[in-house]
Image: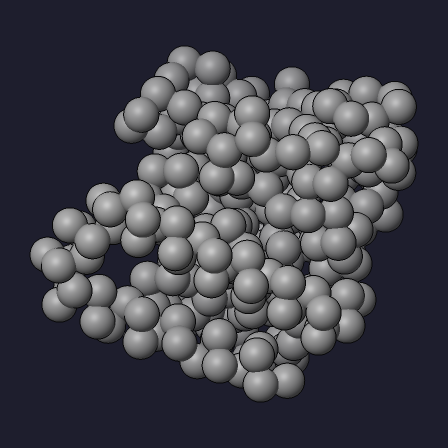
Amino acid sequence: MSVHVSRRALVGGMATGAGLMLSGCDRIGDDPHFRSLLKTGEHGNYALQRLLQDRTALAEEFAPSQRSPIFRANGTRMPSGDVYAQHVATDFANWQVVVDGAVARPQAFSLAEIKAMPARTQITRHDCVEGWSAIAKWHGVPVKLLLDRAGVSPQARFLVFHCADPQSNGTMYYESFDLIDGYHPQTILAWAINDALLPVPNGAPLRLRVERQLGYKQAKYVQRIQAVTTLAGIYGGGGGYWEDAAGYEWYAGL
């Protein structure tokens, strides 16, 4: 589909030109009218993607021989604070993922329980807004299974993923997307990469993989999945850390 191809092809170009545009974009980006205009375009892109795309269409998957030699660890490589350090020291024995919010049966899954659930393995390409891509093999539990256990309310529209990853503004990293991506078969909480346990720099013990969106939507160190009817009350209301802090698009579909 043309929408899919053009979006993916632009990722590298966005990063290449970023340095040249920063000085001008800083002033323009601070203009609330300009930001409002960008948001209007984003909503149009989201509506067009949902209208034209098969909602169950899979992101491209690759052969084992096509995997990249390394998978970069960008962003946080080790969350700060004593709590996460204690989890690392105990091999995440006490790690839990809470599923709550607009659900009938709030749940708290231990890492052991998650690893015992039916898993999915997929070899996919990660496209970063910084301009790089890498292919890796991921193994983990489909988010759908956790949502089914919790019984998501018919009124819920979005899923917010909260992480153990403190940011410079005092919040923890967070991301969100709609229930269409939440129930997509390739949306998983991965606990292994390339046939090995997920390392800390790549998001141990659990990293979100939502394969039809850009890399900043792939939240690391996931601790909580919150079903909500609106994103308005979640931090700055933009739906994610980078969306609130730097004006990134909420819908980063490929």
- Residue at the far top in the pictured view: 82
- x, y percent for residue 252: 52, 59
Q: Quadrant of the C terminus?
A: bottom right
The foreground one among 234 and 215 is: 234
Residue at 68% x, 48% y: name it.
178
The foreground one among 121 and 213 is: 213
The foreground one among 59 and 7 is: 7
- Residue at the far front in the pictured view: 33
Residue at 39% x, 71% y: name it.
11
Q: Quadrant of the N terminus?
A: bottom right
Quarter of the image holding residue 37? bottom left
Residue at 63% x, 23% y: name it.
95
- x, y percent for residue 3: 57, 79
- x, y percent for residue 103: 83, 26
Residue at 46% x, 66% y: name it.
127
Q: How is the image coloured?
A: one colour
Left or right of 134 in this view: 151:
right
Report the number of numbered marks. Answer: 0
Quarter of the image holding residue 232? top right
